[in-house]
Structure formats: structure tokens, C-alpha cells
Amino acid sequence: MVESMKLIIFSFTASLGFGIVFRIGKKNLLWAGAGGALTRCVYLFLLEVIDQRILYSLLAAMFAALYAETMAMRQKMPSTVFLYPAIIPLIPGDLLYNTAVNLLLQDTPQMLDNAKNCALSLAGMSIGFVLISTFTYYRRIYYVGTDIAHHLLHRQKKKS
Amino acid sequence: MEMRSGMNDVEYVLDFVVNLGNKMLGAGANLERVNDTMMRICLSYHLESISIYSLSSTIMVSARSADGIYGSRHIAVQPASIHLERLNQLNRLSRTVCSEKPVPSSLISLFDETQQTEEYSVPKVILGYLIAMTSLCVIFGGTVRDVLAADCITFVLFWLIRWLSGRNLNHIVVNTLCMWVSGTLGLLLVRFGIGEQYFSIIITSSMMMIPGIPLVNAVRNLLCGNEMNGILEILKVLMETVAIVLGVVLSIYLFGGLIQW
């Protein structure tokens, strides 16, 4: 529990730090940090209940993307602004680094293992992002379509 | 279509569109969003036969106006660092253009507003790096002394990258050189008792350079149908990562004996 709390707090500060590095506006920095902390929370929970790396990466990425889309709608900003800091806890940078180390040290079995884990994480994350962005895209189209339909109906009523 | 200084309106719109795409990609937008934005602007000016082809290194756009005048633009994307506040401003600009449709010849001057983005001062950016690296070092299991060592390396790396980026050097060479310096510094710091676990320190420092966001975007592009861009980006990320690790391995081969002194 203490270890998990430590990870969540440091995920918050890591995302906040990267928020400054990525030049997010001051008023959104705390939201950037919150995205990282919440994504870590969900990731830790999923680690407990799911074994497959691709699945827990996918669900955690879906959560991060959903958070980013919700914040983007609330703050009227591109979702990328909230997505990049939120996915900091999920990026398998250490796995990528270890893969390259094993490659250079010619430790093939270890390299393949790290590469497989890295690829599964990335695939899961990307599928998660694509699912959420497709959902929000069609949601937007639906609402734009509804607006246009309302507008046309209103005009027809006025005419009649 | 009106003609001004040898350019027609379709060319003014395309000029604006490719420049906007270039700036958005530079600020960190993903390709999907950039293509979508360029398409919306072209449609809002009633252009027809719109064709957009973009990679993270180039953008090509062609279109035809309602009265049959063709235009095309091709631009090489300038590499830049992620700047999400600028991306926000560019996004706002694209929405304004789509809704208000300003005169095409005035479009390019609208970029001036996005240049006035509030910037963090250099000390604040360094502070951001230090906060991020401190947190990552703890997450990777580093001790307080490791955090101190990782922060020293982060500080040196920041200035080194800044100095090298003005020298127009190959990216692979820059990555290898930077990680060789940080690998050597890490060994020295462990040798002098400032750091404890060399690999916690060095993995943390490498996170400053490992292209995590481009890697995620590359795989996303691959899944979204931008296969060409996805493959090129993955190759680039892999080359950069191997260069980063090569720098560390070289420092261990050259100065690895320092730890055993």
C-alpha cells in the first residue's frame, strides 16, 4: 500500500515535471500531474487483476485517453495537451532501454523477452488510444449531426 | 478567385494550411489531427479535389478552387521540441479560421498571434526536468543519493543538449555523445560516493533522451493507417535508442573500471 502510494505521488510529480518540459500552460499543470497520478492508480489496480500485459496496457491507455478527452472538452483544448503527461507512467522507456542494452551485449534471449514485453505494451496502448479517439470522433459527429438536424427542423417549423 | 501579387486565393489558403501543419507537427501534434485540421480548413474555403499527403518530415497538399484554379504546396517539416501551449494556440487559430473564414491573403499574418505564447524561462524548464527525473529515479528504485546523482547528470545533459542542438549535428551522434557523457558522469558519481546504484541513475538519465512519445505516436500511426509514417518513425526511434545505449556501453567499456577503484 505504502509502495503504491509512493508510486502514485511520484507519478503525479513526474507528469507535472514533464508538463513543464512540454510547455503546458501554468493553469493546466496540475491537471497534467493529476492525469499521471490517476493513470498510475488505474494501472496499479489493473496489474492486480489482469495478467496479460497487452490487456492491462490497453485498459490503462484507454483510461488515460478518456481522461485527456474529458479534460480537453472541459478546458476547450486539444486532447494531446492532457494525453502526453497522462501516459508518462505507461511509456515502456525502461523496457526499450533494456532491449537495446541486451542487443548490444548480445544477450539474445533477454533481448527478445524485453522486446516482446515492450511491443505488447506499445500495441496495447496504441489500440487503447485508437479505440477512444474513434469513439470520441463518432460522438462529435453525432452531436454535430444532431445540431444540424435541430437547426434544419427549427427552420422548417419557422417556414411552416 | 482574386489575384494578388501573382498568387491566387487557393495558393494563399494552401500556404497557410501547410505552414499550420508544419507548426502543429513541430509542436507535437499527431499526424491524424494535423491532416484533419488541414482538411477542415480547405473545406471551409470550399476547395475541391483536396489531396493531403503528410509524413512527420514532409507535407504535400493540392486542391482546386470552385472556379477550377489548381494549387499545390510541399513543405519539409522542421524538427522542433514538443510545445503543447503553442499547439493549443494553433488549434484555436484553426478553429477561428474555419468559423470566420478571413480573407485568404491575410491568413499567413495570423501566425503572429501564436508566436506570443507564454514561454517558461530556462531555470523553470530545468526545474521541470529535475522534478521529472527525481520522480522517475524514485520510481525506478533509486535512493536519495541516486536521485542527487541523477539530478546532477540531468543538469549537465540539459546544457549539453542545448549546446549541441545549435551545432546542426546528426541526431544519432548527439544521442551517443550525450549518453557517453552521462554514463561517464554516472560512473564518477558512484565512484565518489554521491550515487549508489549505477543502473538506476543511468536509466533515469536516459529517460530524458529516449523518445517515448514519438514511439507511442509511431505505433499509433501504424494502427491508424499511416503505415509509411509509422514504420519510418519506429525505425528512427529504434536507431535513437540504440545510439543512447551505445553511449552508455561505451562509457562502461572505457571507464567501467572506475567503480572498482
Image (cartoon, coloured by chain):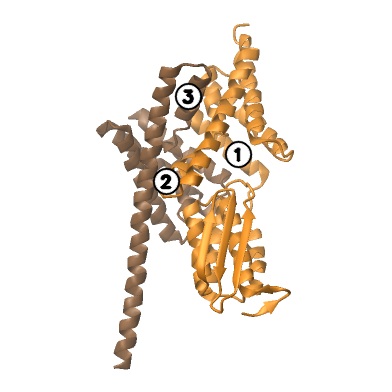
Q: Which residue is mark 1?
A: B127
Chain ID at mark 1: B
Q: Quadrant of residue B68?
A: bottom right
| Amino acid on which disc 1 is placed | Leu
User: Residue B138 in the image: x percent, y percent?
Assistant: 48, 28
Reading the image, the residue beneath label 3 is A98
Residue nearest the observer in this picture, A68 or A54: A54
In the picture of the structure, the residue carrying the numbered disc 2 is A35
Q: Is disc 2 in the same subunit as disc 1?
A: no
Could you tell me if the residues under marks 2 and 3 are in contact, i.e. CB atoms within 8 Å? no
Q: Residue A116's spot in the image, x, y percent?
A: 39, 28
Q: Is residue B159 above or below residue B257?
A: below
- x and y percentages locating residue A75 in the rendered image: 45, 60
Q: CA distance from mark 2 to mark 1?
A: 20 Å
- Left-right relation of B174 to A44: right
Specify the amino acid type for callout 2.
Gly
Element at label 2 = helix
Colour in which the image shows chain A? brown
Closer to the camera, B252 or B89?
Answer: B252
Chain bearing mark 2: A
In front of the other: B53 or B118: B53
Q: Colour of chain B?
A: orange
Disc 2: CA contacts within 10 A as few (<14), some (14-19) or many (>=20): many
Instruction: Please report the residue visible at 41 percent of the width from the left and 49 percent of the height from the top.
Output: B224
Q: Quadrant of the C terminus of chain B?
A: top right
Question: Closer to the camera: disc 1 or disc 3?
Answer: 3
Q: CA distance from mark 1 to mark 3?
A: 27 Å
The reply to whether residue B173 is visible in this rendering is: yes
Query: In this rendering, do the residues under marks 2 and 3 share a single chain?
Result: yes
